[in-house]
Amino acid sequence: MAYTEQRTDSEGRTGYVGRYRVDGRLRSTRRFTARREALAEARRQEEAGKHAEWVDPSAGRVTVAEWFATWQEARVDRAPRTIEAERERFRSLVAPAFGDRPLRQVTHEDVARWAATMVSPTTGETASPARRRDAARLLVALLDAAVDARRLRTNPARTPSGKVPALPRAPKTKPHRYLSHEQLRRVADATTSPQTRTLVLLTALTGLRWGEVSALTVADVDPLRRRVSVTKAYTRLDDGTLLLGDTKTHARREVPLPASLADAVAVQAAGRAPGDLLFTGTRGGALRRESFDRSAFRPAVLAAGGAVRALRTALGLGTPGLYDDGVAAAVRRLQSDAGREPTGVCDPGTWTLVVRADQARAGLTRGEKVSRTRLLTALSRTTLGPGATDFDTLTLHDLRHTAASLAISGGATVKAVQRMLGHESPVLTLSTYAGLFEDDLDTLGETMSAAFQASAVVPGTAAVTPIRAVRTRAG
């Protein structure tokens, strides 16, 4: 039962503290001038303890920065990149406003005002909506953890109904880029090494993330079973360090290895031990995304993406990026003049003729001629046919989007695409690639229409037997 005791401080002032018991321990309130106030506070604390709502008043005295450090120590299961991003976000956006403030002094009004006017330390201007949204979510999660640790009775960043301050709208993500099978083959053919070609095709036909494909070992690929085991991934920290750990979802999975790639993968793995990396950098270490993108992937994409335009320019046909009838006719004439079969398809042999007939070289500087020679050399490994189109540049991650697009257009179910990409749920797959399923509505409409038309009774034929309702027992 709660009671009070008279106390005298160091300056001789007399007051009262409330005494109460929680979790089997006798505790004290702060000192009050009036005895009834001390007794009321002790009774409130004791009642909170009976309902498992008691919070040690001293636990909320730690600062937000101190609690963040404690909270981070317990999040060892998180990916290193996630931890690094949270620390940067806290240091640059949360700490300047709340770092030195005790947990119990954070108010809802302060959080709401900060979320709306958050300033970037680098520019001195209001932070971007994405940064403000992420920082506010971090603070809410940090204070939720303080409630769970019984350092706060309620989260001051939430209203009594549990709502958080109005967060900036999530920025619109840039549109996904997808390659057709023909465009993907063009990019692969424009690469300059067998390793680059195999890696591009493997990524675009299996949907592996860069961290996953760069961490593959020889033992992870089974050309006989045509399976690729995805068990780990590289994570790059801001300081350039590569860490080998779990996949993004901390789950292992198997993806199908296309039969058309089995031989190329076997060649790539030849002469290597089971534990060796399948794809390596120039010095034998892990392949880094930045160097691969700069020196191997991007040049191939730029060449392949402008292949039709380069061909038209060489033939003196203008620059629209479409392989139309005019281009096909010019290619046939070029092939006929050289004594070749006039197929109208620009294959590697025909590219040799195109290089000789290149009409764009006149008036170019020496440097421009060297660049054009390199471009046509890269294109000489590709094949273009009627209907081919140019495409804009894309990133390595767009190869993952391409894998989803090709799988869906090939008739794969949402569940199959989810398993291939390693999404945590089909809902994520649907929300990410909802636009790719819109054609299903057209197909469904045509199917329903065809079925309805087929049900019509044609004069002179037997009537359609109606479907009888099937009764089922209740329960």
Image: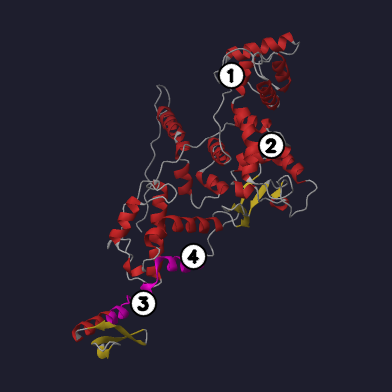
- Mark 4 or mark 1, which is nearer the start of the sequence? 4
From mark 1 to mark 3, how far is it between C-alphas? 75 Å
Secondary structure beneath dot 1 equals: loop
Disc 3 marks which amino acid? Ser
Q: Is residue 46 magenta?
A: yes
Disc 4 marks which amino acid? Gln
Q: Nearer the viewer, residue 165 or 447?
A: 165
Q: Position of residue 155 (x, y in %)?
A: 33, 65
Q: Nearer the viewer, residue 294 or 334?
A: 294
Residue assigned mark 2: 197
Residue assigned mark 1: 323
Q: Quadrant of residue 3?
A: bottom left
Secondary structure beneath dot 4 equals: helix
Q: Nearer the viewer, mark 1 or mark 4?
A: 4
Q: Position of residue 53 (x, y in %)?
A: 32, 75
Secondary structure beneath dot 3 equals: helix
- Mark 3 or mark 1, which is nearer the start of the sequence? 3
- Mark 4 or mark 3, which is nearer the start of the sequence? 3
Q: Nearer the viewer, residue 471 or 334?
A: 334
Q: Do callouts 3 and 4 mark residues in contact (Cβ within 8 Å)? A: no
The numbered disc on residue 72 is: 4
Specify the segment rendered in magenta. 45-74
Residue assigned mark 3: 58
From mark 2 to mark 4, how far is it between C-alphas? 41 Å
Q: Nearer the viewer, mark 2 or mark 4?
A: 4
Crowding at mark 2 (Cα within 10 Å: few <14, some 14-19, many 20+):
many
Disc 1 marks which amino acid? Tyr
User: What kind of secondary structure does the magenta stretch mostly adopt?
Assistant: helix
Disc 2 marks which amino acid? Arg
